[in-house]
Image: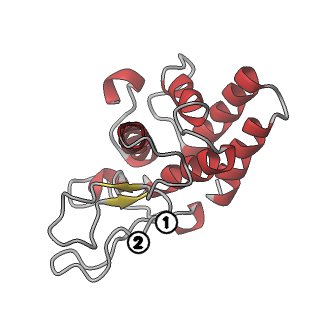
Amino acid sequence: MENEANLNYEKQAGALNESFSDVFGIMIKQRANNQDVKKSNWLIGEKVMIGPKYALRSMKAPGTAYLNHPDLGDDPQPATMDKYQNLTDTSAGDWGGVHINSGIPNFAFYVSAFNMGGYSWDKAGRIWYAVMTDTNLAQDAKFADIKNLTIVHAGKMFGVNSPEEKAVKQGWDEAKV
Protein backbone atom coordinates (compact mmCIF):
# COMPACT_ATOMS: atom_id res chain seq x y z
CA MET A 1 0.00 0.00 0.00
CA GLU A 2 2.87 2.39 0.70
CA ASN A 3 3.93 2.20 -2.95
CA GLU A 4 0.40 2.83 -4.24
CA ALA A 5 -0.45 5.73 -1.93
CA ASN A 6 3.16 6.82 -1.24
CA LEU A 7 2.32 7.77 2.35
CA ASN A 8 5.09 8.58 4.81
CA TYR A 9 5.53 5.73 7.27
CA GLU A 10 5.14 7.75 10.46
CA LYS A 11 2.41 9.24 12.62
CA GLN A 12 -1.07 9.58 11.04
CA ALA A 13 0.15 9.00 7.47
CA GLY A 14 1.81 5.76 8.57
CA ALA A 15 -1.33 4.72 10.47
CA LEU A 16 -3.31 5.36 7.29
CA ASN A 17 -0.84 3.18 5.40
CA GLU A 18 -1.44 0.37 7.91
CA SER A 19 -5.18 0.94 7.73
CA PHE A 20 -5.27 0.75 3.92
CA SER A 21 -3.48 -2.61 4.22
CA ASP A 22 -6.08 -3.81 6.73
CA VAL A 23 -8.97 -2.52 4.60
CA PHE A 24 -7.81 -4.44 1.55
CA GLY A 25 -6.85 -7.46 3.64
CA ILE A 26 -10.31 -7.70 5.18
CA MET A 27 -11.96 -7.33 1.79
CA ILE A 28 -9.86 -10.19 0.40
CA LYS A 29 -10.73 -12.32 3.43
CA GLN A 30 -14.43 -11.50 3.08
CA ARG A 31 -14.38 -12.18 -0.66
CA ALA A 32 -12.58 -15.52 -0.21
CA ASN A 33 -15.19 -16.53 2.38
CA ASN A 34 -18.11 -14.98 0.44
CA GLN A 35 -19.02 -12.92 3.50
CA ASP A 36 -21.03 -9.75 3.48
CA VAL A 37 -20.35 -6.99 6.00
CA LYS A 38 -22.86 -8.40 8.49
CA LYS A 39 -21.39 -11.94 8.53
CA SER A 40 -17.71 -10.98 8.76
CA ASN A 41 -16.00 -10.99 12.15
CA TRP A 42 -13.76 -8.09 10.97
CA LEU A 43 -10.65 -9.64 12.54
CA ILE A 44 -7.22 -9.29 10.96
CA GLY A 45 -4.69 -12.06 11.63
CA GLU A 46 -6.91 -14.24 13.78
CA LYS A 47 -4.80 -17.32 13.10
CA VAL A 48 -1.42 -15.61 13.39
CA MET A 49 -1.14 -15.42 17.18
CA ILE A 50 -0.95 -18.47 19.40
CA GLY A 51 -4.27 -19.07 21.12
CA PRO A 52 -7.80 -19.28 19.70
CA LYS A 53 -9.01 -16.00 21.24
CA TYR A 54 -6.34 -13.70 19.81
CA ALA A 55 -6.11 -11.69 16.58
CA LEU A 56 -3.75 -8.94 15.48
CA ARG A 57 -6.48 -6.33 15.02
CA SER A 58 -10.24 -5.91 15.16
CA MET A 59 -11.68 -3.41 12.70
CA LYS A 60 -15.12 -3.70 14.29
CA ALA A 61 -13.89 -3.07 17.83
CA PRO A 62 -10.30 -1.80 17.94
CA GLY A 63 -8.73 -2.52 21.30
CA THR A 64 -10.37 -5.95 21.64
CA ALA A 65 -8.35 -8.13 19.23
CA TYR A 66 -6.53 -9.63 22.17
CA LEU A 67 -7.08 -9.33 25.88
CA ASN A 68 -4.90 -10.76 28.61
CA HIS A 69 -2.39 -12.09 26.08
CA PRO A 70 0.46 -13.77 28.01
CA ASP A 71 3.14 -11.70 26.23
CA LEU A 72 1.35 -8.63 24.89
CA GLY A 73 -1.29 -7.91 27.52
CA ASP A 74 -4.27 -6.03 26.10
CA ASP A 75 -4.74 -4.64 22.60
CA PRO A 76 -3.82 -0.91 22.78
CA GLN A 77 -5.64 0.21 19.62
CA PRO A 78 -8.07 3.11 19.95
CA ALA A 79 -11.24 3.23 17.86
CA THR A 80 -11.76 6.98 18.14
CA MET A 81 -9.68 10.11 17.67
CA ASP A 82 -10.18 11.25 21.27
CA LYS A 83 -8.10 8.21 22.29
CA TYR A 84 -5.34 8.88 19.70
CA GLN A 85 -1.93 7.98 21.09
CA ASN A 86 0.70 10.63 20.36
CA LEU A 87 3.79 8.42 20.46
CA THR A 88 7.38 9.25 19.59
CA ASP A 89 8.52 8.91 16.00
CA THR A 90 11.00 6.14 16.84
CA SER A 91 11.04 2.38 16.59
CA ALA A 92 10.15 2.14 20.29
CA GLY A 93 7.28 4.57 19.71
CA ASP A 94 5.91 2.58 16.78
CA TRP A 95 6.94 5.41 14.45
CA GLY A 96 4.39 7.70 16.02
CA GLY A 97 1.84 4.93 16.56
CA VAL A 98 1.40 3.62 13.02
CA HIS A 99 0.13 0.21 14.16
CA ILE A 100 -1.70 1.42 17.25
CA ASN A 101 -3.54 4.40 15.77
CA SER A 102 -4.56 2.56 12.58
CA GLY A 103 -7.55 1.39 14.62
CA ILE A 104 -9.16 4.81 14.12
CA PRO A 105 -9.40 4.76 10.30
CA ASN A 106 -10.06 1.00 10.45
CA PHE A 107 -13.10 1.66 12.60
CA ALA A 108 -14.26 4.42 10.23
CA PHE A 109 -14.07 1.96 7.32
CA TYR A 110 -15.90 -0.74 9.29
CA VAL A 111 -18.79 1.59 10.22
CA SER A 112 -18.99 2.96 6.67
CA ALA A 113 -19.01 -0.47 5.03
CA PHE A 114 -21.39 -1.96 7.61
CA ASN A 115 -23.87 0.87 7.11
CA MET A 116 -23.70 0.49 3.32
CA GLY A 117 -24.45 -3.22 3.69
CA GLY A 118 -23.75 -5.93 1.16
CA TYR A 119 -20.19 -6.77 0.22
CA SER A 120 -17.48 -4.38 1.41
CA TRP A 121 -15.72 -4.40 -1.95
CA ASP A 122 -18.81 -3.26 -3.90
CA LYS A 123 -19.04 0.25 -2.49
CA ALA A 124 -16.85 1.14 0.50
CA GLY A 125 -13.82 -0.61 -0.97
CA ARG A 126 -14.19 1.26 -4.25
CA ILE A 127 -14.30 4.56 -2.35
CA TRP A 128 -11.21 3.75 -0.27
CA TYR A 129 -9.31 2.58 -3.36
CA ALA A 130 -10.16 5.81 -5.17
CA VAL A 131 -8.79 7.76 -2.21
CA MET A 132 -5.65 5.65 -1.97
CA THR A 133 -4.86 6.34 -5.63
CA ASP A 134 -6.00 9.99 -5.64
CA THR A 135 -3.23 12.34 -6.83
CA ASN A 136 -4.39 14.85 -4.19
CA LEU A 137 -3.44 12.43 -1.40
CA ALA A 138 -0.47 14.03 0.36
CA GLN A 139 2.42 11.92 1.61
CA ASP A 140 1.87 13.33 5.10
CA ALA A 141 -1.94 12.93 5.04
CA LYS A 142 -3.85 13.16 8.28
CA PHE A 143 -7.02 11.27 9.21
CA ALA A 144 -9.10 14.40 8.47
CA ASP A 145 -7.66 14.50 4.94
CA ILE A 146 -8.79 10.93 4.29
CA LYS A 147 -12.18 11.69 5.81
CA ASN A 148 -12.62 14.58 3.38
CA LEU A 149 -11.39 12.59 0.37
CA THR A 150 -13.62 9.59 1.14
CA ILE A 151 -16.64 11.91 1.37
CA VAL A 152 -15.71 13.56 -1.94
CA HIS A 153 -15.24 10.22 -3.70
CA ALA A 154 -18.44 8.77 -2.24
CA GLY A 155 -20.29 11.81 -3.59
CA LYS A 156 -18.66 11.46 -7.02
CA MET A 157 -19.38 7.73 -7.26
CA PHE A 158 -22.80 7.47 -5.68
CA GLY A 159 -24.13 11.03 -5.56
CA VAL A 160 -24.01 13.90 -3.10
CA ASN A 161 -26.21 13.08 -0.08
CA SER A 162 -26.50 9.46 -1.26
CA PRO A 163 -26.82 6.71 1.35
CA GLU A 164 -23.18 5.79 0.60
CA GLU A 165 -21.92 9.32 1.22
CA LYS A 166 -23.95 9.47 4.43
CA ALA A 167 -22.48 6.10 5.53
CA VAL A 168 -18.95 7.44 4.97
CA LYS A 169 -19.70 10.57 6.99
CA GLN A 170 -21.19 8.44 9.77
CA GLY A 171 -18.13 6.17 9.79
CA TRP A 172 -15.78 9.09 10.36
CA ASP A 173 -18.17 10.67 12.86
CA GLU A 174 -18.27 7.43 14.86
CA ALA A 175 -14.45 7.43 14.82
CA LYS A 176 -14.62 11.06 16.06
CA VAL A 177 -12.50 12.41 13.23
Q: In the figure, 66 relative to 94: above or below?
A: below
Q: Which of the 4 quarters of the picture holds residue 99?
A: bottom left
Would you say the residues marked 2 and 1 are in contact, meaning their CB atoms lie under 8 Å apart? yes
- Determine whether the residue tagged by mark 2 lies in a helix, strand or loop: loop
Front-most of 62 and 38?
38
Q: Which of the 4 quarters of the picture holds residue 56?
A: bottom left
Tell me the colour scheme of the image. Answer: secondary structure
Q: In the figure, 177 relative to 71: above or below?
A: above
**In the rendered image, which residue does mark 2 sit on?**
64
Three-letter amino acid code of the residue under disc 2: Thr
Q: Position of residue 66 (x, y in %)?
A: 31, 72
Q: Position of residue 148 (x, y in %)?
A: 67, 36
Q: How many marks?
A: 2
Three-letter amino acid code of the residue under disc 1: Ala
Q: How far is the residue under mark 2 from the one under mark 1?
A: 6 Å
Q: Position of residue 115 (x, y in %)?
A: 68, 49
Looking at the figure, which quarter contains the N terminus?
A: top left
Mark 2 crowd level (few <14, some 14–19, many ≥20, 10 Å Cα):
many
Residue at 32% across, 23% down: 3
Residue at 70% across, 30% down: 154
Left or right of 91? Residue 2 is right
User: Which residue sits furthest right?
Assistant: 161
Residue at 61% across, 41% down: 118
Front-most of 100 and 37?
37
**In the rendered image, which residue does mark 1 sit on?**
61
- Determine whether the residue tagged by mark 1 lies in a helix, strand or loop: loop
Residue at 32% across, 79% down: 67
Q: In the figure, 149 relative to 76: above or below?
A: above
Q: Position of residue 65 (x, y in %)?
A: 36, 67
